[in-house]
Image (cartoon, helix red, strand yellow):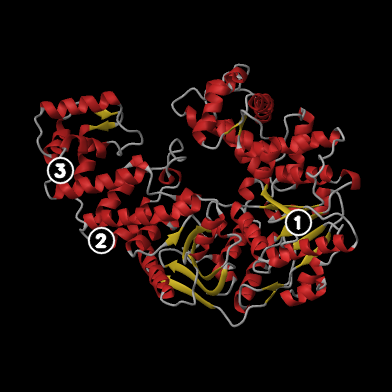
Amino acid sequence: MKDFDELIKEAGLNRSQKKFCKMPVDKNIKLLAPAGSGKTYSLLWRCRYITDEAAKNGYPKPNFLIFSFTKSAKLELESRIEKRSEFKKVRATIRTLNSWGWELIKRPGIELITTRKQKANLIIHDLQPTLNKFPYIQNAIKNPSKNQKAADVIELMDLLKSLGFTHHMSKTDYKSHVKEIKDLGLFPILAEGYEFLYKLEGIQGEEDKTKEERVMNFFEFWKKAVVYLDAVGRYTFEDQKYWARLFLEKQIEEKKTPSRGKGFTHIMVDEFQDINPLDMYLLKAACLYFGQKRKKTPITILGDDDQAIFGWRGSTPRYILHPDVYFETKFATCVLEINYRSPKNIVELSNQLLSYNRERETKEIRSGAKGRASIKVVRSRKVASSIDATMKIVKSLLKDKKYSSIALIGRRQTTLFPYQVLLGNEKIAYYVDYDMNIFEGEAMTSLQEIIHIVDMARNKHVRDPINSLIVIIDKIQRYELNKQEKNDLKEYLIDNGVRSFKESVESLKDYSGNIKKNLSGKKAYTIIRKLIDSDTVYDLMEQIVSEFEGFDKDYTKQETDVQYKEPQFFRLKEISKSYGKDFAKFNDDIDMARIMAEHSYKKSADDSMEAFKDIEKTRVHLMTATRSKGHEYDAVIILDADDEVWPDRLSGDIEAERRLFYVALSRARKNLYFVTSDDTLESRFLLETRLI
């Protein structure tokens, strides 16, 4: 039988990988693993080394608890263990923190709350007994937008859990923990979470209170609400980790140990740079719980401070930069020094970009890939022409079999939507995550219905003129007509004897009073007249985007429709120019895009290994930069590489934005494109990398 040194030599591990794998088995290790450095491969060989050492010394077989950040990363690890004979010896439980926490605390009768509507119902229904003791919150949500505000209350409650607060804390404990949050650089997230609390209307008796007093009152409500929701079995995703943390801390306090066969000898945490305070407390408790007889279970944390991109969820690179401070124990540091994914010029590009960040650990990374990548900045005059240029690149790459995977990466979700339509039109299969499905929502259905009505009106073939008119009016303002308003309008049109769509529209001019609050008949007539007089598809989309508030952002609908979470029809407007006056073809192409998207969404929603492998075979992938983490592609196209997009104009953290840009560009193996338009300035990151 070959010894370990022979095995890793045959496996081709480099010097830095070998050093990590052969560290003493009882060491706590921080492994800094830049993009493309073979982190997953090294992790599994580390597990194999520990397993072999135990067998050599006559110890029981090690049992690893490996935490991945996403389900896809979990499946990839399981796939490698399944496929590679050298890892068959490794005994490992692979989970996300959420799924593992859920296994610890799940009991009969618990309901998992996942949507904003369900969250709102917790406040409006389940928490009424608690709210009776806090009338200032109860009164604040008694208005037309109560569902939105109620859901915001639950999300603020979750934020407190994410940031490490517990319902056992006193006022003094709370203030002490706020100081810790400030030291971590996370206070702006907490302050933003509380911002809506300061603006709540109808807070009786709270007008003269300071912000601090309002916060402490809310904290008292939060503590009681957390206990009550646990008692009635209503858990959010954060509760999966929150109650697991408290369970383990109680077990430790009571000196209880895992039952026989359920303990773990080593804990490994992937993507450690993305953990938040709640994750940190849960991991710290796990190390103590499973290692009480040896004080603490050895833990290996893997990640890259340069890829810390989830600040919005309370993540901070400081945990991976200083783990000894937060785990209160010593860590040995290893660095994987070779990037096998990206050629030398992409690695140099990355190093140059990251040199502008101050909060990071300096690393000497070199490329292990052959040749040089093709790196191009693709300039276009307008946004629409940049979309055309991108499609031209994609179709060219697809003709060459050496490009087995192509990624279109955007800073925002809205960037990707036009390509779903254009790729569908070209019958090019693609993959996009299921929660980006805009085609199945009510907004897209209504838009297509309006386009069809306008097309029919142009040809004088609208079959149901009255109801067709109401379909359009429903989207002029944020809220649709109520039942009484619809009946009043229908009665008026019938009494006027309208027989055609044109007559229905013309009748609006003489409608007395308002069709709806702030919408007179004359105003509705003017808007609809301009809509049906649209000469081209682009003119119609211009009217939709500028005049129809019913397609704007709406928090009450965002759970079920992507359009209302992040409006995207302005992007559809950009690609509509090429359709001229062909309204029917525009609608047909959206239908085709829907069919193509459905296939992708089914794969995305399927957690099976078969679906994972099927996704890997898909050549074209659409994603945001945050979703690109952990993946690699032969060709990467960075969309909208313009200032105010990269970095996002709303972000106050330039270093985090720079890390996100690095994550996106470092996915590339062979070709890397940055698409810009002359409508705006190029991204400052292109200047920093000396590409322009």
Dot 3 lies on which element?
Answer: loop
Q: CA distance from mark 1 to mark 3?
A: 64 Å
591 above or below 441?
below
Q: Amino acid at mark 2?
A: Tyr
Q: Return the residue at label 2.
A: 579
Mark 1 and mark 3 residues within 8 Å of each other at the beta carbon: no
Residue 596 image position (x, y, % from top left): 38, 57
Residue 389 image position (x, y, % from top left): 39, 70
* Quadrant hosting residue 336: bottom right
State which tag comes first along the sequence, 2 or 3.
3
Tag 1: Cα neighbours inside 10 Å, few (<14), some, or many (≥20)?
many
Q: Return the residue at label 3.
A: 462
Q: Amino acid at mark 3?
A: Val
Dot 2 lies on which element?
Answer: helix
* Quadrant hosting residue 43: bottom right
Q: Amino acid at mark 1?
A: Ile
Q: Return the residue at label 1.
A: 301
Along the line of sight, which residue is nearer the eye, 73 or 662? 73
The residue mark sitting in front, 2 or 1, is 1
Residue 399 image position (x, y, % from top left): 41, 76
Residue 523, visible in the rendered structure: no
Residue 11 image position (x, y, % from top left): 72, 74
State which tag comes first along the sequence, 1 or 3.
1
